[in-house]
Image (cartoon, rainbow, N blue to C red):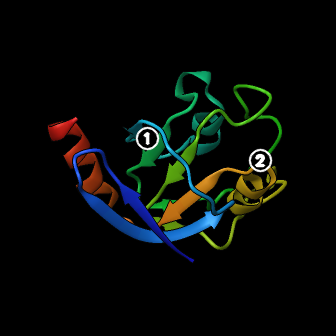
Amino acid sequence: MKALLALEDGRIFRGYAFGAPKERGGEVVFNTSMTGYQEILTDPSYKGQIVTLTYPLIGNYGINSNDVESAKPQVEGLIVREKSSIFSNWRAEKSLEAYLEEHEILGVERIDTRALTKHIREKG
């Protein structure tokens, strides 16, 4: 399903929805970490925000119940360059997509996260 990220200044980024595809709103922020997406999703400091992850492939080690920062995800949405369709880790219990679906969180992939991050950094 196609997805659209429309910023307050009129800039539009087009991608594809995963997780729980529905309309969301919030402050778009970015994180440049190479790992730790599960901790980012559940970090209370990201409450209500749409988080852009700049590392190009997200979801490859899945989700487990031990690496959470809070009882549920705090983000309003997640933006990635590419969502891994396969996850592999001995501790993994489910895929990133299944986790987002379960918690009704919108994910958007195939967006140029570097361009989006640069735009956020320069324009706010």
108 left or right, relative to 93: left
Disc sitting over residue 110 in the figure: none
Above or below, comparing residue 26 to residue 21 in the picture = above
Residue, far top: 45
Amino acid, disc 1: Ser
Place of residue 72 in the rendered image (x, y in percent of width and height, measured from the top left): 76, 34
Q: Residue at x 17, y 39 (%)?
A: 123
To which residue does mark 1 refer? 33
Q: Identify the element where label 1 is drawn.
A: loop
Above or below, comparing residue 18 to residue 25 in the picture = below
To which residue does mark 2 refer? 103
Tell me, yes or no, whether the two marked residues, 2 and 1, touch with CB atoms within 8 Å.
no
Question: Is residue 57 visible in this depiction of the protein?
Answer: yes
Mark 1 packing: few (<14 Cα in 10 Å), some, or many (20+)? few
Residue, far left: 122
Place of residue 84 in the rendered image (x, y in percent of width and height, measured from the top left): 59, 68
Q: Residue at x 37, y 41 (%)?
A: 32
Above or below, comparing residue 16 to residue 122 in the picture = below
Q: Residue at x 69, y 60 (%)?
A: 20
Q: CA distance from mark 2 to mark 1?
A: 23 Å
Q: Residue at x 22, y 46 (%)?
A: 9
Res 107 quadrant in image: bottom right
In front of the other: 112 or 123: 123
Q: Identify the element where label 2 is drawn.
A: loop
Place of residue 31 in the rendered image (x, y in percent of width and height, measured from the top left): 41, 39
